[in-house]
Amino acid sequence: MELYVLLPWLCVVFLELTSGVAHVEAHVTQNKNALKKKYRPIYHISSPKGWVSDPTGFTFFKRQYHMFFQYHPYDGSWGHINWGHAVSMNLIDWTHFPPAITPKEYYEMHGCQSGTALVNNNYLTLFYTGTVLADNETFQTQNLALSADGVVFQKYIYNPIIREAPHGVGEFRNPRVWRFRNTWYMMIGTTSRERNGKLILYTSGDMFNWKLDGTIAESMGDMGYMWENPDMFEMDGQHILIFSARGIKSEGYRFRNLYQTGYVVGHFDYVLGQFEDLEISTATFIELDYGHDFYAAKTMLARDGRRLLIAWLGMWESDLIESKDGWASMLTMVRELRLSDSGRLTMTPVREIVDLRAEILEDAWYRPGEMFYAGTKSFELIVNSSAIVSFVGLALEWGAEHRYSIGYHADHGHVSVDRGGTDGVRIAEWSPSGFVHWRIFVDGSSIEVFCGEGEVVFSSRIYPKKEIRVRVSGDTQLHIIQYRLRRSIGHNNKKPTKRNKKRTKLIKKFKIDSEPNV
Ligand SMILES: *[C@@H]1O[C@H](CO)[C@@H](O)[C@H](O)[C@H]1NC(C)=O
Ligand SMILES: *[C@@H]1O[C@H](CO)[C@@H](O)[C@H](O)[C@H]1NC(C)=O
């Protein structure tokens, strides 16, 4: 092996030996009593203090799932972004770890943005975007950090590995990195000179030295001015490209949110570095989730072959009532993806989620107009209709006039939700083959509605000030099962083994969730 290939690895090893944990600093101090828990979720990844948004990396390393996410530790607003870090053995019980990367270096002064987490040569490897704001301009570069133990990360000393966008535009972020045969590929979100969303591709033989390969895909005009958070994977012989677009105009009930996250299905040609015969337009781009709050999806391949997805259960520029209490937002639950016969992705809750069921609260038929009290802020509903009817409806109500309603309208062939307010309605085409079947997850201030086998999903924030009532509001009776779900986000309070004691101490110091792991 030649020296220039070896050199980066030698530097990494050297760093491992010398620099310890200096980059992880004590900054997550908090006054437990000051934390207001009113809208806090208990089984979604969030933080009792600080801002949480886009998942930045999702992978499996040393028998654990690692989730990384944009995290601003100091208050409930967006700011200099760190990579928050949570770890799980089972995809539902998550333990917060110290932030994996914090902005320190000149090339990332204003934040370490989303990218990719992957495992290579026994190193948990993070690719991320460094952001610098100067003279009202954004400068973004691509960078690398590595960890041998999955807790302490070292930034590569020759960062940035890509110093500027090829055509000089500032928006240049969210490297999605993967390996195919002997080559590393990196796809980056950007905008063209003409202000069209665009994804560009780099290749590398060693993951340290990259060369520009070209444009993978570009908006032809109706797909917004900036594309970010790309993700690509193969499923059933097809390539699925997921990305988030800024600036798509809404068309009827499509693209109602400020920004959109969706996918196209095609075939990626590794020789050309492009998709074969695929025009990416609003005709081929399909929204992943039809709720108000869903952005920046990230996927990984589980050991058992499942393609798992997680996203931010949030949307830019939305009112986050909780941010005045010092925390903001949450991630979605982990979901499983499948490709249907009609070439559409379906999303279902990760199957392990049933292990959150702590108690069965309801299991009965309810007639139109009948209701029951939820009795808890964190629960699952399984709703089935008994007949094919024209209107099936369910509403969650609180206080005198607040409600979140779900309706299936057979005549229109669509399902809708309405959380109230001026922009409360979201609609998606849906024609269940048999009876209506919904799985609904409520957690403090979030709701996720899975329709049928996951053909349509709505994820939104809601702010129930009072106890929720569940009411049948359509013209048919419904069978409803309700489970109370247990807390699954916390910190690990298992007794440390001697070998892990030092590390556990470090982790404890940074535990950011004050509630016990029940
Ligand atoms: C940055 O933008 C502000 C407001 O638009 C302007 O007042 C200021 O002069 C700008 N600074 C530079 C260095 O261009
Ligand atoms: C509800 O419908 C789903 C999907 O058709 C089915 O798997 C489930 O067994 C049904 N549950 C009840 C209680 O009928």
Image (cartoon, helix red, strand yellow):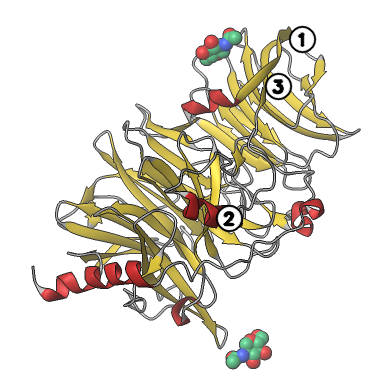
User: What's the amino acid at mark 2?
Assistant: Ser
User: Of the numbered discs in the image, which one, if any, rests on residue 53?
Assistant: 2
Instruction: Write down the residue under mark 3.
Output: 393
Q: Secondary structure at mark 3?
A: strand
Instruction: Write down the residue under mark 1.
Output: 367
Crowdedness near tag 2: few (<14), some (14–19) or many (≥20) residues, C-alpha within 10 Å: many
User: What's the amino acid at mark 1?
Assistant: Arg
- Is label 2's Cβ within 8 Å of ligand 1? no
- Of badges 3 and 2, nearer the viewer stands 2
Q: Position of residue 339 (x, y in %)?
A: 36, 32
- Is label 3's Cβ within 8 Å of ligand 2? no
Q: Secondary structure at mark 1?
A: loop
Which residue is at a point 29% across and 50% down the rendered structure image? 278
Question: Rounded to the nearest whole Å, what is the CA distance between mark 2 and mark 1?
Answer: 40 Å
Query: Which quarter is ligand 1 in?
Result: bottom right
- Is label 1's Cβ within 8 Å of ligand 2? no
